[in-house]
Amino acid sequence: MERLKIGNKYQIHSYKHNGQIYKAWDEATLLNFDFKKGILVFANNCTTVTEKDGHTWKTKEPAILYFFLHKWYNIIGQYKGRGICYYCNMASPIIIEDNTIKYIDYDLDVKVFANGSFKVVDKNEYNYHKKKFNYPKEIDYIIKKQLNELINEIRTKNNYFNNKDIENWVKYYLYLENNKKIKKKVDS
């Protein structure tokens, strides 16, 4: 694991099981990390996302990103005007190299709406890629087990699905970004 520094920006690369890059985010700012718990917290806002076909788009709102060293999913808390929504990707635990967060995306996603309801999406995509890329039985087992763990976290609003925590992380992120702008002006 690279030496990490709070406030530094990192890229995010999502791959498919065959090793091909799937999506890339230009930046995410490191807010916190706890290696004992195996969690890293990042944030971004209006960052450019590049799809595998080269198409780009920008995110629309501040987001808090929870990445894990031992869990097979990641969680994005999106600070939308109508409330906080969550987008969860079933994915391999991350590695960080060359200032880039890297993981394998395993297709299944869970959308958590502002009212707390949720929906598992992309089941057909998962089944298609499972056959196409010949996912080992161990991966299939882990993904399904971790999906159940994630759904339990969502239902109980444990840990990462606490809206107050997302609000506090967003405030901290904006504070860090504002201080960087002020420092840049002073140094100019």
Image (cartoon, rainbow, N blue to C red):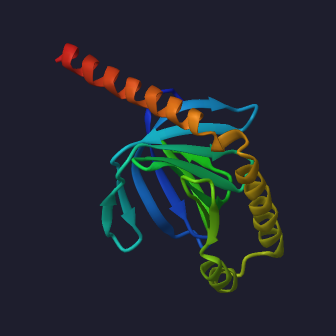
Dividing the picture into quadrants, the one containing residue 148 is bottom right
Q: Is residue 176 above or below residue 28?
A: above
Quadrant position of the C terminus in the picture: top left
Up/down of 181 relative to 167, above or below = above
Farthest residue in the front direction?
115
Q: Residue at x 47, y 39 (%)?
A: 43
Residue 95: % across, % down = 62, 48
Which residue is most to the top? 186
Q: Residue at x 65, y 78 (%)?
A: 123
Residue 183 appears left or right of 50: left
30 or 61: nearer the eye? 61
Q: Is residue 183 visible?
A: yes
Residue at the spot x=63%, y=50% of the render? 94
Rendered location of residue 5, percent (x, y)? 51, 27
Residue 3 appears in view:
no
Q: Left of 182 or right of it: where is 37?
A: right
Along the line of sight, the residue nearer the viewer: 101 or 106: 106
Q: Position of residue 144 (x, y in %)?
A: 78, 68
Q: Which quadrant would the N terminus be assigned to in this image?
A: top right
Q: In the figure, 32 relative to 155: above or below?
A: above
Viewer-proximal residue, 65 or 94?
Answer: 65
Please identify the residue farthest to the left as the structure is shown. 188
Marker count (numbered):
0
> Residue 4 at x, y = what percent?
55, 30
Side (left or right) of 53 relative to 3: left
Residue 5, compared with residue 98, is above or below; it is above
